[in-house]
Amino acid sequence: MLRRIFFASLFSWTSLFTGLAGLVHLSPAQAACPEQPLASAGQARAIGESANARRVPLVLVTHPSKSFDPRLSSKRGTDELMRVAKVKGWPSLYLKDDDKIPQYFVDDCDPTGWVFSQDGELNFDLPAREVYVAGGHLELCLSRSLHDLILQWAKAPPQSRRITFVMDAIYSNGKYFEEGKAGFDDLQKFFAVTNYRRPGGEAWPKLNLLESMGVIKSPAEQLEYLKTVLPHWDRTFDERWRVEVIDDDDQVTVLRKGQGSSPPVMQFKFVDSMLDQ
């Protein structure tokens, strides 16, 4: 349902002007977070262990900063993810770089821990078996977080794992779109509008991953695009592992079958939003 609603409204002029107006006037709910103490590597690991002990996911948000997503394309999705996390008691970690915390756009300033991470690197062990991810950039710092995470998991004793991408909570610069392939021309039009007469160059044109799906439109081509944004699982997990992609409609695509009758499974799950959770 969310996808159908989204497709119907993506290029609506009303929605577009509302979004642009939001850049000029921010609501009181978007007050800046104060500076926060940072968790140590040991404390961050303990937060991951607590998720396993309670058999719940962990939420990992990489750099939810106005410096990188000034259009706030991922703000609503991130706020909804944190709302669900708090209601369900999921632990959460925000990764911050050398930006001041008041530059971070999240409404919830009180995750389980804030951790320093200049480029999205995980300088701590994260043993959680299931992780919801948000933030960005999809192509840069969030990609680094994902690669570090699956590398840790590949080195640990094999057990099934899952990463859930909350698509409206992930911001992107569109660099995975390739000229001549699905959505590239429409993406340029989208950025031309959102970036119209705005200073800042590359810092301005961002869209969230769900908007990327709206640009691409074709379900088959959407799936191909999602495969390109995955961390390099094929270089990280050995042949024992079964690897799956699961879309918002719970359609499973097997990328590798794995070995044996009961292989460890690495699942990459994509959900449109946590808005209806």
Image (spheres, helix red, strand yellow):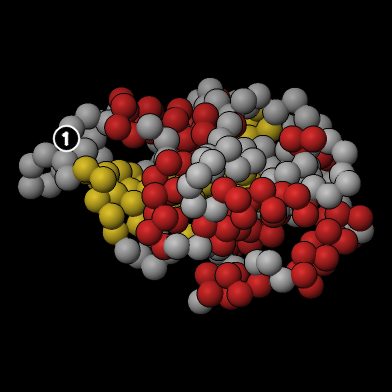
Q: Residue at x 46, y 41 (%)?
A: 229
Corner quadrant of residue 218 = bottom left
Visible residue check, residue 210: no
Front-most of residues 158 and 38? 158
Q: Residue furthest front?
A: 180
Kind of residue sitting beneath label 1: Arg
In the displayed structure image, the side of residue 64 where residue 204 appears, left or right: right
Visible residue check, residue 18: yes
In the displayed structure image, the side of residue 222 where residue 7 appears, left or right: right
Spot occupied by residue 207 in the image (x, y as percentages of width and height): 66, 50
In the displayed structure image, the side of residue 223 where residue 64 appears, left or right: right
Residue placed under numbered mark 1 in the picture: 240
Q: Residue at x 65, y 67 (%)?
A: 10
Front-most of residues 228 and 69? 228
Q: Residue at x 77, y 64 (%)?
A: 16
Residue 6 drawn above or below residue 188: below
Residue 263 drawn above or below residue 88: above
Residue 218 drawn above or below residue 54: below
Q: Residue at x 75, y 25 (%)?
A: 98
Spot occupied by residue 146 in the image (x, y as percentages of width and height): 47, 35
Spot occupied by residue 9 in the image (x, y as percentages of width and height): 66, 72
Q: Residue furthest left?
A: 261
Front-most of residues 8 and 123? 8
The tally of labels here is 1
Count residues near mark 1 (Cα–Cα under 10 Å), then give few for <14, some for 14-19, many for 20+: some
Corner quadrant of residue 77 = bottom right
Q: Residue furthest right?
A: 25
Spot occupied by residue 88 in the image (x, y as percentages of width and height): 52, 62
Corner quadrant of residue 15 = bottom right
In the displayed structure image, the side of residue 87 where residue 249 appears, left or right: left
Residue 210 drawn above or below residue 229: below
